[in-house]
Image (tube, rainbow, N blue to C red):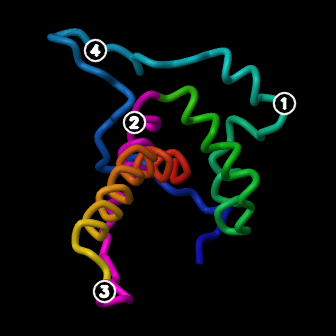
């Protein structure tokens, strides 16, 4: 079990992703919204990694969501990662026609099957599911 008060070097051997290299020049994170910091500052215990560790260990989902929203709005790399993971799953569908009556005409079955495919294609299920996951 992780002790909150123990000293942990989280950056050992990890490349520094907050820097963006453009040619020979190094820039700080290109997408940084400083207004977001002021918006969330009163509600979150900033400046302390232990607050995040404590929220993780205590399963404090409300605080973790608040941290996640802050990083999503202020850090471009975190935002891209969240969007990538949310839309990684394809959310495809597979339709299997079920014929209950042997007297049904093939033309009617194909027409209904086509209507169902058009409905699903025009319903934007993939985008909606990705937005829900995000």
Residue placed under numbered mark 2 in the picture: 80
Left or right position of 91 against 66: left
Label 2 vs label 1: CA separation?
26 Å
Mark 3, secondary structure of its residue: loop
Residue placed under numbered mark 3 in the picture: 103
- Residue lying at the far right in this picture: please name it: 42
Residue placed under numbered mark 4 in the picture: 26
85 inside magenta stretch:
yes
| Chain part drawn in magenta | 76-103
| Position of residue 14 measured from the top left corner of the image (x, y, whole percent) | 31, 46
Label 4 vs label 2: CA separation?
20 Å
Q: Which is closer to the viewer, label 2 or label 1?
A: 2
Residue placed under numbered mark 1 in the picture: 42
Looking at marks 4 and 2 on the same chain, the residue that comes earlier in the sequence is marked by 4
Residues 3 and 78: in front is 78
Which SS does the magenta portion mostly show?
loop
Mark 1 and 3 residues: CB-CB less than 8 Å, in contact?
Answer: no
Label 2 vs label 3: CA separation?
53 Å
Looking at marks 4 and 1 on the same chain, the residue that comes earlier in the sequence is marked by 4
């Amino acid at each position: 079990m992780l002790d909150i008060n123990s000293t942990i070097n989280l950056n050992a051997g990890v490349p520094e992703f907050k820097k963006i290299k453009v040619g020979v020049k190094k820039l700080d994170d290109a997408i940084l919204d400083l207004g977001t910091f002021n918006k969330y500052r009163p509600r979150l215990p900033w400046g302390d990694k232990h607050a995040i560790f404590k929220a993780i260990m205590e399963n404090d989902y409300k605080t973790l969501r608040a941290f996640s929203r802050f990083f999503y709005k202020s850090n471009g790399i975190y935002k891209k990662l969240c969007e990538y993971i949310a839309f990684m799953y394809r959310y495809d569908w597979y339709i299997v026609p079920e014929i209950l009556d042997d007297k049904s005409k093939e033309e009617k079955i194909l027409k209904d099957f086509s209507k169902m495919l058009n409905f699903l294609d025009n319903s934007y299920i993939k985008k909606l599911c990705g937005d829900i996951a995000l």
